[in-house]
Image (cartoon, helix red, strand yellow):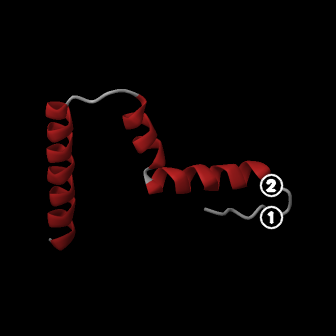
Amino acid sequence: MEVKVLDNDLEKAMRILKKKIQNDGLFKRLKLKKSYEKPSEFRRRKQREAQRRQRIASARNR
């Protein structure tokens, strides 16, 4: 991942980098890897994520 700094505006470059990392899902993955997740919690989370993706997809198709 690469962010170019224009006109020595480091704050703007940092904001752009943070947004790119968030959109990539890196923060979320790091948070999940921080501690152990029980298999039942893992399945429940995956199911909720799938339902959320399905809701978003159906809302786009309307």
Residue, x 42% and y 30% (percent of image)?
34
Gap in angstroms between the C-alphas marked 2 and 1: 6 Å
Residue 24 percent location from the top left of the image: 46, 56
Residue, x 14% and y 46% (percent of image)?
47
SS at badge 1: loop
Left/right of residue 41 with respect to residue 33 in the rendered view: left
Pick the residue in front: 35 or 2.
35
SS at badge 2: loop
Mark number for residue 38? none
Residue, x 21% and y 57% (percent of image)?
53
Left/right of residue 52 with respect to residue 7 in the rendered view: left
Identity of the amino acid at label 1?
A: Leu
Pick the residue in front: 12 or 4.
4
- Residue under label 2, please give it: 9
Residue 35 percent location from the top left of the image: 37, 27
Tell me whether circle 2 and circle 1 mark residues in contact (CB < 8 Å): yes
- Residue under label 1, please give it: 6
Q: Quadrant of residue 31?
A: top left
Left/right of residue 21 with respect to residue 49 in the rendered view: right
Residue, x 54% and y 57% (percent of image)?
20
Residue 62 percent location from the top left of the image: 14, 71
Residue 26 percent location from the top left of the image: 47, 48
Residue 56, above or below 22: below
